[in-house]
Image (spheres, rainbow, N blue to C red):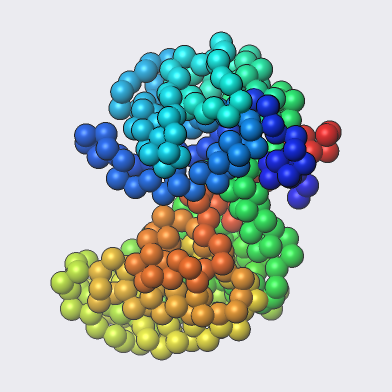
Amino acid sequence: MNFLRFTELCQKGLVKGQRVFIRADLNVPQDDHGDITDDTRIRASLPCIQLALDAGAAVMVTSHLGRPQEGLWTPRDSLSPVAKRLTELLHRPVALVKDWIEGVQLNKGEIVLLENCRFNIGEKANDAALSIKMAQLCDIYVHDAFGTAHRAECSTYGIAQYANIACAGPLLAAEIKAISKAFTSPQRPLAAIVAGSKVSTKLTILKSLSSKVDQLIVGGGIANTFMMASGLPIGKSLCEPDLLDEAKQVMRDMKERGADVPLPSDVVVATSFSPEAKAIIKEAKDVKPDELILDIGPQSTAHLSAQLLKAGTIVWNGPVGVFEFEPFSHGTQGVAQAIATSKAFSLAGGGDTLAAISKYGLTDQIDYISTGGGAFLEVLEGKTLPAFEILSKRAQNT
């Protein structure tokens, strides 16, 4: 995928004295007092911001936060706590500009944070007039928020249409590189792990991957539906019986390509959904009507781990069991450790997936951890993200 990189502009000395508008993802969680509880996204945005400052640019940064009503400013959705945290991390003052659409006074080497972009009427609708006004604020637009790359809004798409120069920041560029490596020219075998509570929420992902991957490993409630479709008993486990035909079709499609959907040969069950529930390991064919499947068994974990160790590329989205409950966490831990140990290029994304990686201390052993939730899922669906599309289009016209 061809697109302009902000790092290249800086290296060529094309950023000094320019007005740079950075769309970052600073949508951080806060407690009831408005204090930031996790500043990971802010820290992830620092390299791009520092790059612009070091290059001698006049830097404007904006982001969304929460889900405010357009046109209505509220302290709960203000970026004020983010401005304070940026000031601490950058060791320089970062003022928050509330009304910025009509113009921003800023000198080179300075930085300001523009108030929550979703306060602006027309932001989510990608209003052309608003997009043009945003574009007029800058000489260079930098998209560095992969978490918003699947949304065509003024600050993520429209401004890129009208800005003099539109490019990808280091965070977005890294996402594009990792995704291209996993799907455009993957090392084979290509294995994908797709897990979650419902097939319906990831059906399009499963269908898309079934035409690309060599192994499609399903887990959680999704695996239960596939097991039922294969004639295995699942007791009172979470399942979607109305989607059995779709599950069968995915398995047929994979088989026709000589690919595989490995199902558990053994499972870990309990009679109640609780961290205190007694965990029982048994053959998948022996699940009783009053039992819940809450994890894959040791035999299945060993089998999947062996497959993953032979993979050339691994894409992971979702834990294979209820890893939050210790008795039912071993399947996910085993799979995670196999991915970390494998020589394959590994790409992981999704909130629960990242939580599992962090829980088992494997963050540094996964090749790339995606920062986008919805955007990552849409990539798995095979969709072209709006941010990728407009940056690629602008690169062709540069």
Q: Position of residue 233 (x, y in %)?
A: 36, 77
Task: Please tell me which residue lies in front, 163 or 294.
Answer: 163
Residue shown at 62% from the left, 53% from the top? 174
Residue shown at 62% from the left, 15% from the top? 133
Q: Position of residue 208 (x, y in %)?
A: 63, 58
Q: Position of residue 300 (x, y in %)?
A: 43, 84
Task: Please tell me which residue lies in front, 74 or 84.
Answer: 84
Q: Does the image show residue 1?
A: yes
Residue shown at 22% from the left, 36% from the top? 32
Task: Please tell me which residue lies in front, 360 or 22.
Answer: 22
Q: Does the image show residue 378?
A: no
Residue at far left of view: 276
- In the picture shown, does residue 210 fall above or below 69? below
Using residue 124 as the reference point, say whether residue 356 is left or right of it.
left
Q: Position of residue 288 (x, y in %)?
A: 27, 79
The quadrant where residue 207 appears: bottom right
Residue shown at 61% from the left, 39% from the top? 54
